[in-house]
Image (cartoon, grey):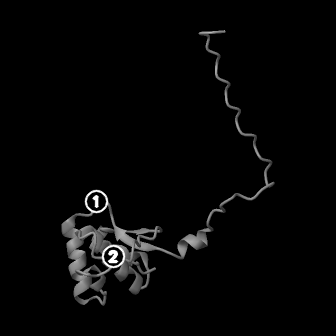
Amino acid sequence: MKGETLPLPMPMPPKPQPSGSRLPAHPLPKPADLMGRKFCRPKEDATDAQLQANLDWACTNQGVDCGPVQAGGPCFGPNTVRSHAAFVMNSYYQIKGKNDFNCDFLGSGVIDFADPSYGTCRYLS
């Protein structure tokens, strides 16, 4: 009838799948897979002063190749202390043995499992 609105049908909930009948479309990674690739990055609350000190220390006499974060290097952009420190802190962590304590940086570093590589900037893992 003209002018009347009919109620919309309620969607049916999906039918539950029997347990064990199908594998998930994207299997979850095994813990061992996750543990194989760890990265060091600055903590969210780390200050620019802390991060600059980390850069100065690691690039001065710790054997870290800081060329990639220099002007013209693949990890120069974005040109921020946080971005440069992330690359250098991770490089130090990786070359010094990947021990959690190698990412402490006086409390300003944290271990992460996400690969922070971007564009042509490739982080060691």
Q: Position of residue 20 (x, y in %)?
A: 79, 55
Q: Position of residue 13 (x, y in %)?
A: 70, 35
| Kind of residue sitting beneath label 2 | Phe
Above or below, comparing residue 68 to residue 110 in the picture: below
The picture quadrant where one finds residue 53 is bottom left
Residue 115 is at least partly visible in this image? yes
Where, quadrant-wise, is the N terminus in this rendering?
top right
Q: Position of residue 107 (x, y in %)?
A: 30, 68
| Kind of residue sitting beneath label 1 | Asp
Residue behind mark 1: 45
Mark 1 crowdedness (10 Å alpha carbons): few <14, some 14-19, many ≥20: few
Mark 2 crowdedness (10 Å alpha carbons): few <14, some 14-19, many ≥20: many
Above or below, comparing residue 28 to residue 2 in the picture: below
Above or below, comparing residue 31 to residue 45 in the picture: below
Is residue 50 found left or right of 5 in the rendered image? left
- SS of the residue at dot 2? helix
At horizontal 62% and vertical 10% (from top left) the residue drawn is: 4
Q: CA distance from mark 2 to mark 1?
A: 17 Å
The mark tally for this picture is: 2
Residue behind mark 2: 87
Q: Which mark is residue 30?
A: none
Is residue 30 found left or right of 70 in the rendered image? right
Q: Position of residue 81 (x, y in %)?
A: 23, 70
At horizontal 36% and vertical 75% (from top left) the residue drawn is: 103
| Circle nearer the N terminus (2, 1) | 1
Front-most of residues 35 and 86: 86
Front-most of residues 45 and 119: 119
Outermost front residue = 2
At horizontal 59% and vertical 72% (from top left) the residue drawn is: 33
Q: Nearer the viewer, mark 2 or mark 1?
A: 2
Front-most of residues 109 and 55: 55
